[in-house]
Image (cartoon, rainbow, N blue to C red):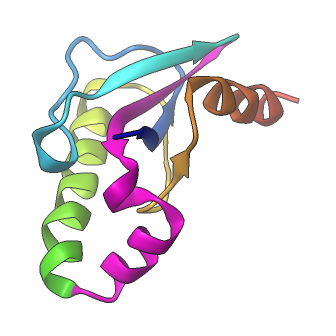
């Protein structure tokens, strides 16, 4: 199974602790220059484009994941001085694509 990278937020500094993410997954950070992305690895079988679109129409699937997304951003907000939360379902193919997005945000 292939994993994708689910991004919760962009941070200016690393928080002291990182919460658990969607489906209890580990939240980690990927740095690029002066920014970091808070993210989790998620299965492509659930978060690939077609599966994610189907999940968005299924409240039983969407509800707990959307709540977890909000809880991660709330906890990051409480432990970080600068935070830009991203919308639910922001998914990248790999860490390098996340780094490219962070570089673009700094230009």
Q: Is residue 19 above or below residue 63?
A: above
Q: Position of residue 98 (x, y in %)?
A: 62, 32
Q: Position of residue 102 (x, y in %)?
A: 69, 29
Horizontal relation, residue 89 to residue 94: left or right? left
Q: Residue at x 18, y 74 (%)?
A: 61
Say which quarter of the image contains residue 55.
Answer: bottom left
Horizontal relation, residue 66 to residue 82: left or right? left
User: Farthest residue toward the right?
Assistant: 107
Q: Is residue 47 above or below residue 83?
A: below
Say which quarter of the image contains residue 66.
Answer: bottom left
Q: Position of residue 81 (x, y in %)?
A: 41, 26
Q: Quadrant of the N terminus?
A: top left
Question: What number of labels is visible?
Answer: 0
Say which quarter of the image contains residue 63.
Answer: bottom left
Q: Residue at x 25, y 46 (%)?
A: 74
Q: Is residue 66 above or below residue 20?
A: below
User: Farthest residue toward the front?
Assistant: 1
Q: Residue at x 78, y 25 (%)?
A: 103
Q: Residue at x 20, y 16 (%)?
A: 17
**Boundaries of the magenta span:** 34-58
Toward the viewer: 81 or 50?
50
Confirm whether the magenta stretch covers residue 48.
yes
Toward the viewer: 46 or 36?
46
Horizontal relation, residue 38 to residue 84: left or right? left
Q: Quadrant of the C terminus?
A: top right
Q: Position of residue 72 (x, y in %)?
A: 24, 43
Confirm whether the magenta stretch covers residue 19.
no
Q: Is residue 64 above or below residue 2?
A: below
Horizontal relation, residue 7 to residue 58: left or right? right
């Amino acid at each position: 199974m292939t994993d994708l990278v689910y991004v919760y937020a962009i941070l200016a500094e690393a928080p002291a602790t990182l919460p658990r993410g969607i489906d209890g997954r580990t939240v980690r950070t990927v740095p690029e220059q002066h920014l970091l992305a808070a993210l989790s690895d998620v299965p492509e079988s659930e978060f690939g484009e077609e599966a994610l679109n189907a999940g968005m129409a299924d409240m039983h699937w969407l509800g707990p994941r959307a709540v977890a997304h909000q809880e991660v951003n709330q906890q990051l907000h409480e432990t970080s001085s600068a935070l830009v939360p991203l919308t639910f379902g922001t998914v990248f193919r790999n860490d390098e694509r996340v780094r490219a997005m962070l570089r673009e945000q700094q230009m």
